[in-house]
């Protein structure tokens, strides 16, 4: 069940649909930026002592970070230190960027399966990295290196997601990186390739257990269901929520020796700076599917579709085999449904 993707009938031939010129133009721009971004920004003239601050300013620019200048201040010292050390050694600045457990949550739990495909989300992540790299290289000529961290052991231990499925996703992600010639600055760090179930059991056994009762909100329950890909009762939602924190804590401890640079996440935490996975994002791509939609001015832009906002859109999926990698089976166009026509019983 877990590996079944959208049926062929749900994906329309691109040339038969009216949205195609707009979608194609958008995707062509993304692909073009991937092919040319790192070559279009020659090093600038900047004092070496100022380079770490310039890299930090670029990283926390609104294009890549949703936090205000005040809120990024706590992360400054760590980033400056990592960049300064990369300067001293004459090597790229290394960033470790969390991209989830190796799959995308269901946008319609119980009706649509989990997805182990790469798609528009991963393509846009590469675009963001390429754009940032082009600018950072102006101040630090050796450039940057990104390791995309996939915590698929967490997916296994929290939601029973088979490693074979998440490793399939990782293989497709590595193929996408190579196909778009980003492998000189992007690689994939897969948790299960370094850490075992026994390692988790050892670390969790060393931790102090907190077995008190747990109350799960409706929002938390919905989140559990989207990552399971099916509906579940409150007792199961509570158990998986309890399991989540213990496993995540163990994962952070086990991955720490492997993360030697700047650790970033899609949503900021107390210890990790955020990095937008796609333009305008302040969300995590693994929570659903990144799709293209239009605003009131008919301008195309990406959004994250989850089980929460799925009823607000009518979706159509298209292939762009000649433009995109064969690893990307479709791109989804999400047309907003006028509120007066929305189905109040839709889920």
Image (cartoon, grey):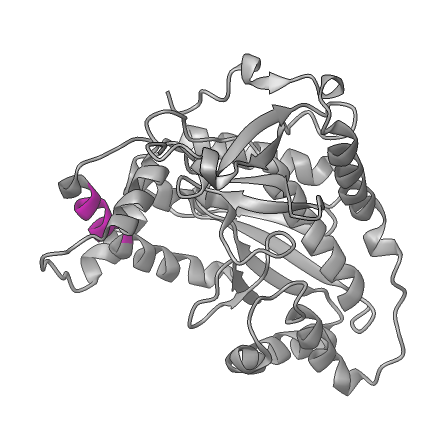
Image: 140 above or below 146: below
Q: Residue 101, percent across and down? A: 43, 44
Q: Quadrant of the N terminus?
A: top left
Quarter of the rendering containing residue 232: top left
* Left or right of residue 193: residue 43: right
Image: 180 above or below 259: above
Q: Residue 10, percent across and down? A: 55, 18
Residue drawn 67% across the image and 36% down it: 176
Using the rendered image of the protein, determine whether residue 185 is visible from the camera's viewpoint.
Answer: yes
Residue drawn 76% across the image and 44% down it: 30
* Left or right of residue 337: residue 346: left
Q: Nearer the viewer, residue 99 or 283?
A: 283
**Is residue 252 part of the magenta span, yes or no?**
no
Q: Nearer the viewer, residue 217 or 247?
A: 217
Secondary structure predominantly adopted by residues drawn in magenta: helix
Stretch of the chain drawn in magenta? 237-244
Using the rendered image of the protein, determine whether residue 104 is visible from the camera's viewpoint.
Answer: no
Q: Quadrant of the C terminus?
A: top left
The furthest residue to the front: 340
The furthest residue to the left: 212
Quarter of the rendering containing residue 86: bottom right
Image: 337 above or below 259: above
Residue drawn 42% across the image and 72% down it: 270
The furthest residue to the top: 9
* Number of disc labels: 0
Residue drawn 57% across the image and 51% down it: 148
Q: Residue 165, percent across and down? A: 44, 29
Q: Residue 59, percent across and down? A: 66, 69
* Left or right of residue 218: residue 139: right
């Amino acid at each position: 069940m877990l590996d079944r993707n959208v049926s062929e009938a749900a994906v329309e031939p691109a040339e038969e649909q009216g949205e195609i010129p707009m979608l194609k133009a958008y995707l062509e721009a993304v692909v073009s930026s991937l092919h040319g971004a790192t070559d279009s920004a020659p090093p600038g003239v900047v004092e070496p002592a100022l380079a770490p601050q310039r890299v930090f300013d670029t990283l926390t620019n609104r294009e890549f970070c949703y936090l205000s200048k005040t809120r990024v201040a706590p992360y400054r010292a760590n980033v400056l230190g990592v960049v300064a050390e990369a300067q001293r050694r004459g090597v790229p600045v290394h960033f470790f960027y969390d991209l989830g457990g190796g799959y995308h949550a269901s946008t319609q739990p119980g009706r649509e399966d989990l997805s182990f495909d790469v798609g528009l989300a991963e393509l846009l992540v590469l675009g963001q990295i390429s754009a940032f790299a082009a600018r950072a290289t102006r101040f630090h000529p050796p450039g940057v290196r990104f390791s995309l961290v996939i915590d698929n052991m967490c997916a296994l231990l929290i939601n029973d997601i088979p490693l074979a499925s998440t490793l399939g996703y990782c293989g497709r992600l590595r193929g996408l990186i190579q196909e778009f010639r980003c492998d000189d600055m992007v690689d994939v760090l897969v948790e299960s390739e370094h850490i075992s179930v026994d390692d988790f059991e050892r670390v969790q056994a060393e931790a102090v257990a907190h077995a008190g009762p747990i109350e799960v909100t409706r929002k938390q329950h919905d989140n559990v269901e989207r990552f399971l890909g099916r509906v579940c009762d409150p007792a199961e939602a509570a158990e998986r929520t309890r399991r989540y924190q213990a496993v995540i804590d163990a994962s952070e401890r086990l991955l720490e020796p492997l993360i030697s640079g700047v650790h970033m996440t899609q949503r900021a935490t107390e210890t990790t700076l955020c990095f937008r996975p796609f333009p305008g994002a302040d969300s995590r791509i693994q929570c659903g599917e990144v799709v293209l939609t239009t605003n009131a001015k008919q301008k195309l832009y990406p959004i994250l579709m989850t089980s929460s906002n799925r009823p607000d859109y009518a979706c159509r999926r298209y292939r762009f085999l000649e433009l995109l990698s064969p690893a990307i089976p479709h791109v989804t166009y999400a047309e907003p449904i006028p509120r007066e026509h929305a189905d109040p019983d839709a889920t």
